[in-house]
């Protein structure tokens, strides 16, 4: 059974960089059948796709966040990571990592989510 | 990439059927048979309920079904149960290879 677990600081100051890591267990992040995505959800609001990475390191980003987002992968640790720069209060949300089936945008496994608050 | 359009809320009584719509464009919902639906209970992560328009993952009740016509996809839940009360989100593959979700629909079981 594939499991994903987000980790990282729960509090980030405005203008700083939010950094999160997703650790994958029960399956290899190097599988060619999947992308690995980040998705966020502000309190009381809907889901927003942030971006995805393939095992090769190729990425796709949400155009509205592209200038501030970097997603990377560490296959040796079976992890992928999110960096979001110049954060504001609007970036306060629960951040999820998810497995994304290549060619379909079907998110079949999700982490439990981690709340990141942007505040001084 | 604009969000897909879903009704904000739907409701139904136990045993009834409800349908949630998800409207996009020919660049997403209408252009590909890759629409998925997610159920989210409060404080929990979303759960995949339907993929590739009408397929159910193992373990998902056959009371959940999906379909698509043109640029609109639909999720139907038959034999409503109290446990079905949750938020539901649609998602679609897009021509730009970006991910996109609907705004979400709150299902209330009366």
Image: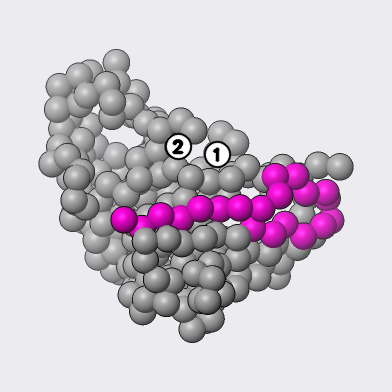
Note whether residue B5 is visible.
no
Inspect the magenta stretch and tell me whether residue A12 lies in it.
Answer: yes
**Is residue A18 rendered to the left or right of residue A45?**
right
- B97 relative to B86, above or below: below
Residue that label 2 marks = B44
Q: Seen in the image, is B5 located left or right of residue A18?
A: left
Local packing at callout 2 (Cα closer than 10 Å; few below 14, some 14-19, many 20+) is: few
| Proximity of marks 2 and 1: CB atoms separated by less than 8 Å | no
Chain holding disc 1: A
Which residue is tagged 1? A45
Quick one: B72 or B56, which is closer to the camera? Answer: B56
- Lateral position of residue B61 relative to residue B47, left or right: left
Q: Position of residue B8 (x, y in %)?
A: 43, 34
Q: Residue furthest bottom?
A: A56
Q: Is B56 situated above or below A77?
A: above
Figure quadrant of residue A25: bottom left
Q: Which residues are magenta?
A: A1-20
Q: Secondary structure at mark 1?
A: loop
- Residue occupying the point 40% across, 38% down: B40
User: Looking at the image, can residue A46 be seen?
Assistant: yes
Total residue callouts: 2
Give the CA separation, mark 2 to mark 1. 14 Å
Near-viewer residue (A32 or A87): A32
Coordinates of residue B86 in the picture (x, y in percent): 37, 31
Q: Quadrant of residue B81?
A: top left
Image coordinates for residue B31, horizontal then vertical, percent: 30, 69
């Amino acid at each position: 059974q594939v499991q994903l677990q987000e980790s990282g600081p729960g509090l980030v100051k405005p203008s700083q960089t939010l950094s999160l890591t997703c650790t994958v267990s029960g399956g290899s992040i190097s599988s060619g059948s999947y992308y690995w995505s980040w998705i966020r959800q502000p309190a009381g609001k809907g889901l927003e796709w942030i971006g995805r990475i393939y095992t090769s390191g190729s990425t796709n980003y949400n155009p509205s966040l592209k200038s501030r987002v970097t997603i990377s992968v560490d296959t040796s640790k079976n992890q992928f990571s999110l960096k979001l720069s110049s954060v504001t209060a609007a970036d306060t949300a629960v951040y999820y990592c998810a497995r994304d089936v290549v060619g379909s945008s079907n998110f079949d496994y999700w982490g439990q989510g981690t709340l990141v608050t942007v505040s001084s | 990439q604009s969000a897909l359009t879903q009704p904000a809320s739907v409701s139904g009584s136990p045993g009834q059927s409800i349908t949630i719509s998800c409207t996009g464009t020919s660049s997403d919902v209408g252009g590909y048979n890759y629409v998925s639906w997610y159920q989210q209970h409060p404080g929990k992560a979303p759960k995949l309920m339907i993929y590739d328009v009408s397929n159910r993952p193992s373990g998902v009740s056959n009371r959940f079904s999906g379909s698509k016509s043109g640029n609109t996809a639909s999720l139907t839940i038959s034999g409503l149960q109290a446990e079905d009360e949750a938020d539901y989100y649609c998602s679609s593959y897009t021509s730009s290879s970006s991910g996109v979700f609907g705004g979400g629909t709150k299902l209330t079981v009366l």
